[in-house]
Image (cartoon, rainbow, N blue to C red):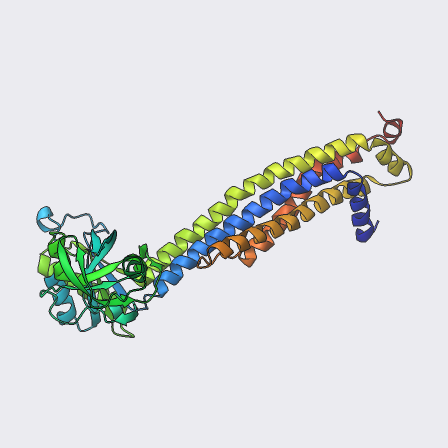
Amino acid sequence: MAVGELIAFAIGALRGHRLRTGLSVAGVAVGISAVVALTALGEGARQYVVQEFSALGTNLLIVLPGKVETTGMMPFGGVVNDLTIEDFKAVTTRIPLVRRAAPLASGEETLRYGGKSRAVPVFGTTEELVEVRRLRVAAGQFLPPGDPDRGGAEIVLGVTVAREIFESESPLGKVVRLGEWRFRVVGVLEPRGRSLGFDFDDLVFVPVRTSMRIFNRSSLFRILVDLHPGEDLELGKQAILDLLAERHRAEDVTVITQDAVVDTLDSILGVLTLALAAIASVSLTVAGVGIMNVMLVAVSERKHEIGLLKALGASTSQIIAVFIAEAAVLSTFGGLVGLAIGELAISIFVGVYPTFPAATPIWAVVASLVVSLVVGLFFGVVPARRAAHLDPVTALAGR
């Protein structure tokens, strides 16, 4: 029997039992759609994180207080020193590789204007943050240049904060209260959205020293360092570590590079994507068992047909091929239906969250179809062998 005739025969047999066929197809489709959807979400999360870090530029170093990588030795005296504005100044003036840097101090306070108020995250920083984080100012200007120790009463608003507090009124030049402190609005940022866990549209920015006074802190949250184009990130990282170790008399800071973070998160999220696909594939096993049960029932119901085929001279291998073909058609059709459902679900998700780059990778599409076919072939073997070994006389008698 030719392959085309075999497939046509299998399709005809399956069409004769539409409900049973439909349930088997649905079982496979659910498994494949779960694999496709979860793989697309995992891949989208990986791409989203990589894009977020890539948007920062290629020469970024992030200095954090505390030693994240353990070396087996306690810092000198067992004390972890704070990152200070003096550390920030030393990094910008004593390391030639550094193009610019921006200190960050953070907190949360209530912003008030007129009869309106709302809690806002506050970043204390300097004018260099605009270039380091690739920010754009929609109206006015960012924080004025000058000595970071000077402080000041200027404030820059994220676009969401400006819209909610001032509505259609221009906030430039207006005096607002941040807690008990008075500030003059000097600028509003362009929409930026969420980046690395912060919604820049929902932030406000004040001079770094003023922020430290508001929150009664002496330490910085981070120092963002931008190296000159083409400079080696590892050399810059080591230079910062050496300088701060000299200043603190201890190795008590961590410097991470953008590339290191991207590579680490890329690998972690890649493994997560595979794990999600593996978890979803468990449902394919359930679908395979369902196919096997359906085919076993089919063998019992079609004994006369099997007996007739064997009486007409069909060989054992041909009987096996017929039933395996039916299982393969079931699983393949279920895989195609599941793929379509999964892609539709992802399209709807992207329509609701357009900034999330969810897309099913080609390897997942191919793997899903291959796995669905293999599931059908694997779980179709037992029913096929059972059918092939029926005695033709007994089968014709319906026993």
Is 141 located above or below residue 289 in the figure?
A: below
Where is 389 relative to 346, above or below?
above
x and y percentages locating residue 199 in the rendered image? 32, 57
Residue at 16 percent of width and 62 percent of height: 183
Residue furthest out toward the right:
312
**Count of labels in the image:** 0
Quarter holding residue 399: top right
Is residue 319 shown left or right of residue 123?
right
Residue 83 visible here? no
Q: Nearer the viewer, residue 359 or 397?
A: 359
Q: Residue at x 12, y 52 (%)?
A: 217
Q: Horizontal placement of 153 versus 397: left or right?
A: left
Residue 226 in the image, given as x and y percentages of width and height: 25, 69
- Between residue 52 and residue 149, name the one nearer to us: 149
x 63%, y 43%: residue: 28
Residue at image location 39% in from the left, 62% down from the top: 51
Picture coordinates of residue 120 (x, y %)?
25, 53
| Image quadrant where residue 87 sits | bottom left
* Residue 248 visible in the current orientation: yes
Q: Residue furthest top?
A: 399
Image check: 136 left or right of 282? left
Q: Nearer the viewer, residue 193 or 295?
A: 193
Is 230 on the left or on the right of 347, as rendered? left
**Residue 64 at x, y = what percent?**
21, 56
Q: Quadrant of residue 375?
A: top right
